Image: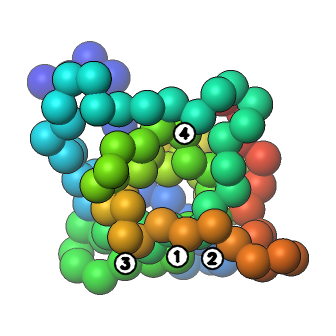
């Protein structure tokens, strides 16, 4: 059992969700980090524990060719993070991003 349980239940726009918390097989040396303070704003389709996805507006912190680590705050300003397939992450258009600042 982990000493620190990772939070997976969050609320967006008044709706409760639980993300699936996928754990990709990461090859040593393949993970890159965006420089601190330059983490890009992204919109991601986060996989849910019960199936399906939910759109999350957050920041990308780490990445590989296949996966991106996303961090966001929910309605209650709680901090969440999970890995998302890179194909499910995109940069927002101008004035499209509705996320909140995340303290890293």
> Is disc 4 surrounded by few (<14), some (14 to 19) or many (20+) residues within 10 Å?
many
| SS at circle 2 | loop
Q: Residue 64, percent across and down?
A: 35, 44
Query: In this rendering, which labeled residue sits more in front, label 4 or label 2?
Result: 4
Residue positioned 31% across, 70% down in the render: 48
Give the CA distance from mark 4 to mark 3.
20 Å
Tag 1–tag 4 contact (CB < 8 Å): no
x and y percentages locating residue 56 in the rendered image: 56, 68
For disc 1, the neighbor class at 10 Å (few under 14, some 14 to 19, many from 20) is few
- The label shown at residue 14 is 2
Real-space CA distance between mark 3 and mark 1, rounded to the nearest whole angstrom: 7 Å
Name the quadrant containing residue 50: bottom left
Position in image of residue 37 (x %, y %) = 75, 31
Q: Is residue 27 left or right of residue 41?
A: left
Q: Residue at x 51, y 31 (%)?
A: 33
At numbered mark 3, what does the secondary structure look like: helix, strand or loop? Answer: strand
Residue contact between numbered discs 3 and 1, judged by CB atoms under 8 Å:
yes
Can you identify the residue that label 1 sits on?
55
* Residue sticking out furthest to the bottom: 52
In the displayed structure, 63 sits above or below 51; it is above
Which is nearer the N-term, disc 4 or disc 3?
3
Give the Cα separation between the discs numbered 2 and 3.
Answer: 16 Å
Decide: marks 4, 2 in contact (CB < 8 A)?
no
Which quadrant is the C terminus positioned in?
A: top right
Q: Which mark is residue 61?
A: 4
Residue tagged 3: 53
Count of all numbered marks drawn on residues in the image: 4
Looking at the rendered image, the disc whose residue lies closer to the viewer, 1 or 2, is: 1
- Taking the image as drawn, is residue 73 in sight? no
Please tell me whether mark 4 sits on a helix, a strand or a loop.
strand
Viewer-side residue, 40 vs 22? 40
């Amino acid at each position: 059992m982990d000493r620190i349980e990772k939070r997976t239940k969050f609320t967006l726009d008044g709706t409760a969700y639980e993300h699936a918390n996928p754990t990709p097989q990461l090859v040593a040396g393949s993970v890159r980090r965006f420089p601190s303070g330059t983490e890009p704003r992204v919109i991601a389709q986060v996989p849910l524990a019960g199936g399906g996805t939910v759109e999350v507006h957050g920041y990308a912190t780490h990445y590989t060719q296949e996966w991106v680590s996303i961090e966001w705050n929910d309605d209650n300003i709680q901090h969440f993070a999970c890995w998302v397939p890179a194909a499910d992450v995109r940069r927002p258009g101008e004035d499209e991003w509705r996320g909140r600042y995340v303290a890293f």
